[in-house]
Image: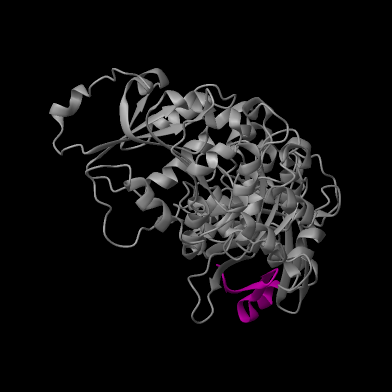
Amino acid sequence: MPSHPHVWPADRWNTRPVKARVLAVARTLTSATRVLDVLTLLAPDGIERYFTVNPGSAFADRALDEYLHGLPGYTVLDWEEAVRRRFDLAVSCAVHASMHRLDARLVVLPHGAGYNRLVTESTGDTVTAAGLSRNELTHHGRVFVDVLGLSHPEQLDRLRASCPEALDVARVVGDPCFDRILRSERSRDGYRAALGAVRRQLVVVDSTWSAHSLFGRHPDLPRRLVRQLPADEYAVAVVLHPNIWSRHDPAGLLDDARRMGLRLIPPHQGWQAALVAADFMIGDHGSVSFYGAALGRRTAVVTTGAAELDPRSPSYAFGQAAPVLDPDGDLAAQVERALAQAPEAPDAPNRLAAITDRSLAHRGRSAQVLRPLLYSFLDGLDEPAGEPLLAPYPRPVPHPGGNGGNSGDGGSSDGPTAYDVEGKSEGTEVSLRRYPFHPADHTPRGFHALTDDHPGDALRYTAEVLARTEAHAERPALGWLADTARELPGLAVAVAALGPARHVLRLRTGRLLEARAEPAFGDPDAVLDPLLLGSAVACWLADGGDPAGLPDHGLTVRTGRHRTRVSFSPGP
């Protein structure tokens, strides 16, 4: 440790006294966000907070620096300045031998679901999980970490084999990230609305990093899922490890899929909320899939990552035991089959509980274990009274992009601007399935329906349905409908939105109708995508429906399990 640490020259300018200084240490964006989970347990008054990046990771990039500088309440120090200062406490969710230079009591915690991955560059061998090796935990043969936090006693056995001298500083503290996810379960409805999953099942595709990961082996899987799943019944979100973002351009690589409605979760925040919101997880050997199964979400893996995991770890066992999704098979059929399974089915998530429990001790109570431990290093500061709580995660905000089409369910507005539509009518009920259109996929599916702002003209002159989705448009609705009929006389139905549940239609015959979705008793206000409405009317007409009867009988539009009753009024 440095013998002459710099003083803190700014103290004379403080309005409130500084009683302790805490340093958060990151090596990557993942470890930075995990440290923040932990430090929320410290009350702000009397504590001055700092952040630094321990250099050397291949995944420390400018995005990490920008993220840290945007954090309120933290002063960012470069590494060389940080090691010249004295702190009461340093907390890191990654460890490296160079951290011995810190003049602080050092608490190290895992940045995933325990310690699982084999990283030879860090550990110096091919058999020890990163975070548990002698190469990382000692300097000149001495353990320099003051507390090595473990998420489960299982890790003590592996530590005993890899670095027995660290057993004296090891503490089983649980997993504050998973406990914060548990705390966020009450926010599930809000998360689902933010991800466009109102009245839909949410499929979350998640991938860790490396060539053995889902995204490393099957980068096209998210796009094919979005294309194959009916858009009114399923929403799809993708969570990619921050290490992928630091080396690649996921937004560009998934641009096609985002135009078809894929929600891309940013690397710094949102994956936990997406996990809580999910109905079905498709992943690999990363922590997100592991946490999903632990949370009780239906989970399947595409790759197991066995080559880069400690074979003694729960993550390795999880990869071997989890249900497998065939990435080259019928994706829609596999998703539907998984979601239809009863809780006691062989592939149900509770069958994996015996494995996930081996990584998550003190479930729901890690805050009670960690807060007193952290305050034990802060002389002069008393631990606050009352129960320590980990706050729910904020609502997810998908990565900007996509087309700004209509989701039709009151959620996110990002979505496709063109669909292949299949449907059938029975009496006054029309059942529809819409699939986001992709020009490279020529699977024949019914007819085309598109929004007026769909780019390109190829579909415009062959589509059966065209809809203007902006209610407060410059041209009045009736004028736009008349102009559209002159431009595109082959349209079966043109629709102009008047509000979230009220639209005006013009049929090929020139008949005008105003439509309004009617909520059932006790239901929220109705929301009806004008393109969905136009598609339903076009399908009903194609099956021989008489438009003269619509004002008397109305229609029921069915997508999957959901029905929307629509009434019609005749126009002039």
Asked whether the viewer can see residue 237, the reply is no
Which residue is drawn at the image coordinates 47% and 55% (left, top)?
180
Q: Is residue 258 magenta?
A: no
Count of picture labels? 0
Residue range corresponding to the magenta coloring: 547-572
Q: Quadrant of the C terminus?
A: bottom right
State the quadrant of the N terminus: top left
Q: Position of residue 297 (x, y in %)?
A: 64, 62
Asked where in the image residue 110 lies, by quadrant, the reply is top right
Q: Nearer the viewer, residue 459 or 292?
A: 292
Residue 514: x percent and y percent?
Answer: 56, 67
Horizontal relation, residue 361 to residue 493: left or right: left
Q: Is residue 551 magenta?
A: yes
* Quarter assignment of residue 392: bottom left
Residue 297 visible, this orientation = yes
Q: Residue at left 56%, top 45%?
A: 404
Please tell me which residue lies in front, 558 or 132: 132
Residue 521 in picture, x, y percent from top left: 51, 82
Residue drawn at x 66%, y 26% as measured from the top left? 124
Eyeballing the image, is 176 above or below 310? below
Residue 504, above or below 116: below
